[in-house]
Amino acid sequence: MAVVIIPKEKPKSPKSGVALLISLSIVTLLSIALMNTFENRTVEVAHLENTLERFQAETLSRSVLRATLLAIRQQGLATIVKNKQTWQNLPIPIQNGSFKIQEIQPIDHLFNLNKKFRLDSPEVTVFKNIIKKFHSDDNYATAVFDEEQALSAINDWTDVDQEPDEEFLYGFEQYPFEEPAYEVKNRPFDLLSELKLIPAFRKLNLDDKYVAENFRVIDSKEYLNINLAENEEVYLFLDRFDDVEGYEMISTYKDELAAAIAGSESDLSSGLVAKSRFLPPLYQRYQSDWELALGDEIAKKLTEPERDLFDLKTDHLRIRYRISVGRVNLDVESLVKVEYLKPKEGLKIKEFRILSFVIL
């Protein structure tokens, strides 16, 4: 019988186990490195896509403003504003994104903060009325803020020297104690959001929406466009002049003034083309449309400063819209000055001047 000899198994060297571990470690490290490289490439691609989408969104934002201004010029401001239910917040596809216009708003009636306030000026009472309107009667009576101090701080912020405001005598604002500390700007506001930097204004506890609905930083006179103002805007504007010296007739005939404006609201004609409530001129020797709507009693009693509170045109517009491209959303706000072909005779727009263009 044949004898099968089985060779004795040679014991494994400890070195072979170490080599295996090293090999596995190298494979693992290479795998991790490849994974990291893949992840890095994925992040880079996503970053490039996001950068491209933002570039496209910013390009579209300028195109949308041009298109909006062109539509206003062609259709007329009255038609655009009075038909806002047809375009407001409506997504409009464009290229690989969309946009929606949130607001086309006349802002000449908003309270101008880029001016020197004086203690004996009617504007101080107007400012106080705006603040009081925001707070309920109970909250206003117990509120811990000072409107005159806020106006003093605004004077100090917008003047051109390093001295404290000399009109209200409140002294320096505590900017060095802010976090982080900063200095007074000493020149006019460029943006409404700068108000948040003024401690005395922040103490008024106004929310951003109310500030945007009541204030502006474009330096021009304040007046209400009686052709475009909505009823709520009319009353908010007239309420500012309660108990304001020199504007007693506005308070006395507030309801009559509001009724004259709203009562002359014209219906939209065919093709959604809106007509102006009142045709120019605003005042004339043999009574204008506006004076006829007021009636002789009121029209003759209004003082010159009170008459200046009303106009038939808009000089400044705020336009807000949102651009969406892929995952990028941009909110844009632009302030525009409107210039007319015949400022005193008609309302046909000649051109626009872009005063600011901010991507938020």
Image (tube, rainbow, N blue to C red):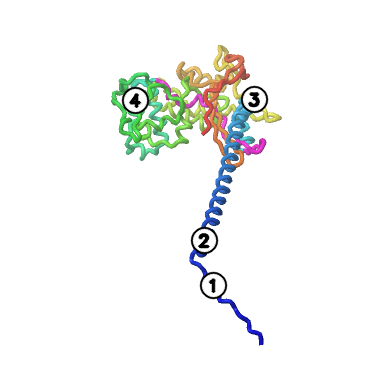
Residue visible at 33% across and 37% down in the picture: 143
* Relative vertical location of residue 280 with respect to residue 10 in this rendering, above or below: above
Q: Which residue is mark 4?
A: 152
Mark pair 1, 3: CA separation: 91 Å
**Per the image, is 139 magenta?**
no
On the image, which quarter does residue 286 sit in?
top right
Name the secondary structure under disc 1.
loop
How far is disc 2 from disc 3 in space, using C-alphas?
Answer: 76 Å
Q: Which residue is mark 3?
A: 70
Distance of label 1 from label 4 (alpha carbons) = 97 Å
Element marked by disc 4: helix
Q: Residue 1's spot in the image, x, y percent?
A: 66, 87
The tag earlier along the polypeptide, 4 or 3, is 3
Give the distance between the C-alpha atoms of the residues marked 4 and 3, in whole angstroms.
Answer: 41 Å
Q: Which residue is mark 2?
A: 19
Which residue is disc 1 drawn over? 10
